[in-house]
Image (cartoon, rainbow, N blue to C red):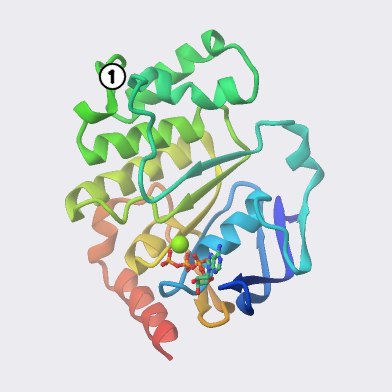
Amino acid sequence: MESLVRLKNVTVRYRSNGRRYLTAVSNVDLGVSPGEFVAVVGRSGCGKTTLLKVVAGLIKPDEGEVAYSERFFNGSKKKIGVMFQSPLLLPWRNVLENILLPIEIIGEDPANYVERALILMERTGLRGFEYSYPWELSGGMQQRVALCRALIHRPQLLLLDEPFSSLDAITREEMWVLLESVFLYENYTTLLVTHDIREAVLLSDRVVVMSGKPGRVKTEVEIPFKRPRNISLQYSKEFNEYVAKIKSMLSE
Ligand SMILES: Nc1ncnc2c1ncn2[C@@H]1O[C@H](COP(=O)(O)OP(=O)(O)OP(=O)(O)O)[C@@H](O)[C@H]1O
Ligand SMILES: [Mg+2]
């Protein structure tokens, strides 16, 4: 199948301290097919965020190229939804206004998206908090708001940069379940970067394992578990075999 987005032989260098160049990622080939959930795992500093920025078009690679499928351009401005490690909500806006922010940015009328915002809030257990302010919410709730905001404009590609790493273990598991259900409902093409191997195996169709300094794709592992996946999957023998295999690849 044609990739929605494909990085071809991508190398990115940063100028560190204005003098020497640091090669953050080197010769990376990575494609994401429509409807696929791909997870990229690697140690801190191996270039995961850099790759996401290249996919989002925020960084231009020094070598190689990013190829987007024609289908990707059909959606005009509604291409990408992003979620980061911290929720980055605007404190002076209530929950509903935060969720509707991308609509204002792409220049459409937020009124046309209120119903969708309420549906997303319903699915993520946020109904009733429309008029609350971010500081009135728990960390997990704030990340759910950030997820709704990332999805409000029906992006063609969802980019997730360690979105749950600041949450406690139980809340993180709740977010995994939520993301799985959102993925099934709306069938998003998703690219997740994380250092949490369990998270990658539970959620993705394919795990891309990176090595560091400079960041390279070491290998890829297909994750065949059927969906919908349940949180209890992580206690199965097969699941833990995948986790152990990927962990050993990372530490090689
Ligand atoms: N703007 C920048 N200028 C200079 N160097 C940078 C810049 N951004 C990242 N780097 C360097 O590039 C390398 C890759 O960084 P990147 O943020 O992509 O890693 P990461 O895998 O996302 O790490 P983490 O898991 O800690 O978020 C690191 O060595 C980092 O110090
Ligand atoms: Mg990062």
Q: Position of residue 75 (x, y in %)?
A: 72, 31
Q: Quadrant of the N terminus?
A: bottom right
14 left or right, relative to 126: right
Q: Position of residue 48 (x, y in %)?
A: 51, 65
| Residue at 26 percent of width and 67 percent of height | 236
* Residue type, numbered disc 1: Arg
Q: Residue 241 falls in which quadrant of the image?
A: bottom left
Q: Is disc 1 placed on a helix, strand or loop?
A: loop
Q: Quadrant of ligand 2?
A: bottom left
Crowdedness of circle 1 by 10 Å Cα count: few (<14), some, many (20+)?
some
> In this figure, which residue is indicated by the disc labeled 1?
127
Q: Position of residue 103 (x, y in %)?
A: 57, 22
Q: Which residue extends farthest top?
A: 111
Ligand 2: does it lie within 8 Å of the C-beta at label 1? no
Q: Position of residue 218 (x, y in %)?
A: 56, 81
Q: Quadrant of the C terminus?
A: bottom left
| Residue at 52 percent of width and 61 percent of height | 49
14 left or right, relative to 132: right
Say if 249 sits above or below 229 in the image. Answer: below
Q: Which residue extends farthest right?
A: 70
Numbered disc total = 1
Q: Which residue extends farthest front?
A: 18
Q: Residue 25 falls in which quadrant of the image?
A: bottom right
Q: Is residue 166 visible?
A: yes
Q: Could you say which is closer to the camera, residue 83 or residue 2?
A: 83
Q: Is residue 206 visible?
A: no
Q: Could you say which is closer to the camera, residue 141 or residue 190?
A: 141
Say if 118 sits above or below 134 in the image. Answer: above
166 left or right, relative to 28: left
